[in-house]
Image (cartoon, grey):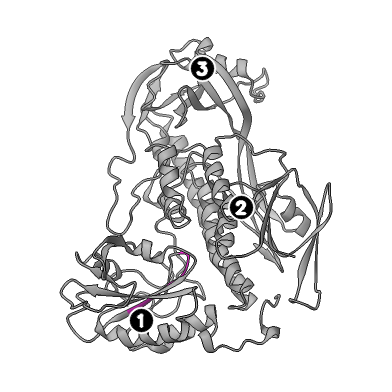
Amino acid sequence: MTDVLIVGAGPTGLVLACDLARRGAAVRVVDRSPAPPRTSRAKGPNPRSLEILDDLGVAEEVLAAGSDPLPMLKYRDRRPVAEADPWADSAPSPDARYGRGWLIAQWRLEGILRDRLAGYGVRVEPGREVVGLAQGRDGGDGGHVDVTYADGPAGRARYVVGCDGAHSSVRKLLGITFEGTTAEDQVMVCGDVDLADGALDRTRWHQWFDEDGAVMLCPIPGTRTGWWFQAGPERDGRGRPLAPTADGFRRLLAHHTALPGRALTRAELLSTYRVNVRMADRFRAGRVLLAGDAAHVHAIAGGLGMNTGIQDAFNLGWKLGLVLAGHADAELLDTYEEERLPVAARTLDLTSERLRATLEAIRRPGGGLDAAITPDTTGLGVGYRWSSLAAGGPAPGAEQPGPRAGDRAPDAPCADAATGERTRLHRVFAGPRTTVLGFGPGSAAVLRETADAYGGDADVRVCRVYAAHEDHAGAEPGAVVDDAGHAAAAYGTGASGDTGAGTVVVVRPDHHVGVLAPADDARSVREYLRRLHGTGRSAERSPGMVDAVR
């Protein structure tokens, strides 16, 4: 029996599959399409998604296949009137390696993730449409989902995750509502096009905004003449939008730009986009869960669609992994909805707000898509302080430097204590493990207790963070030296080596802080790890308590 069946092989499903496969879970990925779609819908990962792709080991390949986001050149009445670079001031910082997002065609990103997944022995199964789901109990491992396909034999899985887009069959089979609105008057036609070589400067994202419509052309990285084409649609005599065609794209190009229609030599993957703002009322029904567009859709302003799905998958993957391994009760899966549903709701509000700001901006000459870009769209500020998995820390409203439980765990450059080689905290966190960081000499006892309890558990690691002036001779394997003080600054621990005091931080596998506590609060660390990983090597788990269904 398959551990997890993932329905949908877009970025959300592929990230989830890679995360589960590296944990040793038996994963299947099916997709109704007969072949991987060659589409460039999403324009690339934001900084938080790049951190996730880094953890999965594919960030360098993604960076090599794409490009920096481009300055925006804006036109009115065919003439350039303004240029803006909303990322000009974005740069890597000690606590965030990726200061800006990255341009890459969605089909190229999906190809990189499929290759990564194949390295774990898992390949996407195309042409497999799910038409039936039935949850049951088999008296063995506690339960299963029987899956019926449009063609071919049925299957069985312990869990099913619907990553199959806004028209999700999985969501519909569960009877989960998808409440919201569709703005029929907010319409855009899209496609991948080729322009004659040299027709436009490929170092700019060109945007023509006129009173009677718009055309936007952004070069597709890794191609010589390929461009993303977006435009207001042509309309018939009654003002109704016309379906996109290659000739229609040529007419739009000639009407709004200084280019002749014949400069557009190819147009394919044509589609009509309407602004949908919808969200499922729940993300879990027993052993079936929803992620990505299957759970929420929103305005494209800010580029958060694919990114929110990737971040859904990273939140869910480690929780499924721990439940499947028998370390945690299936109640842990409740925290997926607890954490990600409010994030989705906030994303719907944020993108609708950014769309309104953009529509207002383009009414004026010089306005453009840069109005959609704000610090909120980086994803780095998303956290879960309200979560039942956020333990310890000061009372709400209390002043505290550094992150709180539930926040994204900051990165920081440091050095390996044994070798002196450069590394960083996110490299320490990398891989499907929970990390316990210890700042200051006072943390040694908690780290030692954790190592004794979980030293044989590949899912938990400890890392002593030494201040630059501390003696780290004979440091434990995996320890690092905070030689520039960036880690202490990021986590608000101050000069942690000055006294016997210290701080302990439990970092979840998805790089969020679970516990941030004084070093003498071993109980908080112990209880938190017990919830996620059992009691360690001495654990005696009752089969009846493992993998139960709510």
Q: Looking at the image, tell me whether mark 3 or mark 1 is earlier in sequence order.
A: 3
Cα distance between the residues tagged 2 and 1: 35 Å
- Amino acid type of the residue that numbered disc 3 sits on in the rendered structure: Leu
Cα distance between the residues tagged 3 and 1: 59 Å
Element on which disc 2 rests: helix
Q: Are marks 3 and 1 in contact (CB under 8 Å)?
A: no
Which of the two marks, 2 or 3, is nearer to us in this view? 2
The disc at residue 13 is: 2
Q: Looking at the image, tell me whether mark 2 or mark 1 is earlier in sequence order.
A: 2
Element on which disc 3 rests: helix
Q: Which residues are magenta?
A: 504-510
Q: Residues within 10 Å of mark 1 (few under 14, many from 20)?
A: many
Instruction: Name the residue: 39% across, 22% down.
Output: 75
Looking at the image, can residue 341 be seen?
no
Q: Is residue 413 left or right of residue 427?
A: left
Image position of 491 with respect to 411: above or below: below
Which of the two marks, 3 or 1, is nearer to us in this view? 1
The disc at residue 517 is: 1
Element on which disc 1 rests: strand
Q: Is residue 508 magenta?
A: yes
Instruction: Name the residue: 58% across, 72% down.
Output: 322
Looking at the image, can residue 7 be seen?
yes
Find disc 3 in the rendering and name its residue: 253
